[in-house]
Image (cartoon, grey):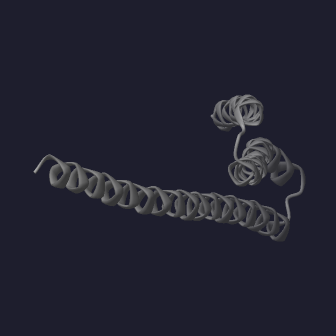
């Protein structure tokens, strides 16, 4: 059963890596804003590291079952699975960092667009008032 789970995790990690490379290439080709491109590159590194960590975890599951069968010491099993849990914790931290970074980036972007929208509305209202005064 762990082999099936490992293969699914490995396939998922591989598919994510391929999708990440395609997304970065598209972002580089369409880049007109250097700040956005820098964000996309940092995001690529974070997500690629997360995908690679998922692949490593996929390998550690069946490897751990095999190694704990070879080395019968309970201390080895405890140390190995604690190491695997540490990898899972690191994977979760990477994912959380990506979520926070993305939220901050798009929050700033939304704020800039809101300010620009308010400025354009004020300018439009000013033009409308001037037109109404000119008609009178």
Which residue extends farthest left? 136
In the image, residue 52 sits, relative to residue 46, either above or below, namely above
Query: At 70% from the left edge and 64% from the top edge, which residue is drawn?
Result: 85
Q: Which one is in front, 29 or 59?
A: 29
Q: Which one is in front, 14 or 65?
A: 14
Corner quadrant of residue 27: top right
Q: Is residue 126 left or right of residue 120?
A: left
Query: At 74% from the left edge and 62% from the top edge, which residue is drawn?
Result: 81
Task: State the image coordinates of residue 4 (x, y, percent, origin top left).
Answer: 65, 30
Query: At 77% from the left edge and 42% from the top edge, which residue is drawn?
Result: 55
Q: Is residue 25 left or right of residue 36?
A: right
- Quadrant containing the N terminus is top right
Q: Which one is in front, 107 or 4?
A: 107
Query: At 77% from the left edge and 48% from the top edge, which residue is drawn?
Result: 41
Task: State the image coordinates of residue 77 (x, y, percent, origin top left).
Answer: 79, 63
Task: State the image coordinates of residue 43 (x, y, percent, origin top left).
Answer: 70, 51
Task: State the image coordinates of residue 61 (x, y, percent, origin top left).
Answer: 74, 46
In the image, residue 16 sits, relative to residue 43, either above or below, namely above
In the image, residue 34 sits, relative to residue 83, either above or below, namely above
Q: Is residue 3 visible?
A: no
Q: Which one is in front, 81 or 55?
A: 55
Tally the numbered discs: 0
Q: Is residue 31 visible?
A: yes
């Amino acid at each position: 059963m762990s082999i099936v789970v490992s293969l699914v995790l490995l396939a998922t990690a591989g598919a994510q890596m391929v999708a990440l490379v395609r997304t970065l290439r598209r972002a580089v080709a369409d880049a007109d804003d250097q700040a956005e491109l820098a964000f996309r590159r940092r995001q690529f590194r974070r997500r690629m590291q997360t995908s690679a960590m998922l692949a490593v975890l996929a390998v550690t599951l069946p490897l751990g079952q095999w190694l704990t069968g070879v080395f019968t010491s309970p201390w080895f099993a405890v140390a190995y699975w604690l190491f695997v849990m540490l990898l899972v914790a690191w994977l979760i931290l990477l994912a959380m960092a990506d979520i926070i970074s993305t939220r901050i980036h798009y929050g700033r972007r939304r704020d800039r667009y809101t300010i620009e929208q308010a400025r354009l509305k004020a300018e439009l209202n000013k033009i409308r008032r001037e037109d109404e005064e000119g008609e009178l």
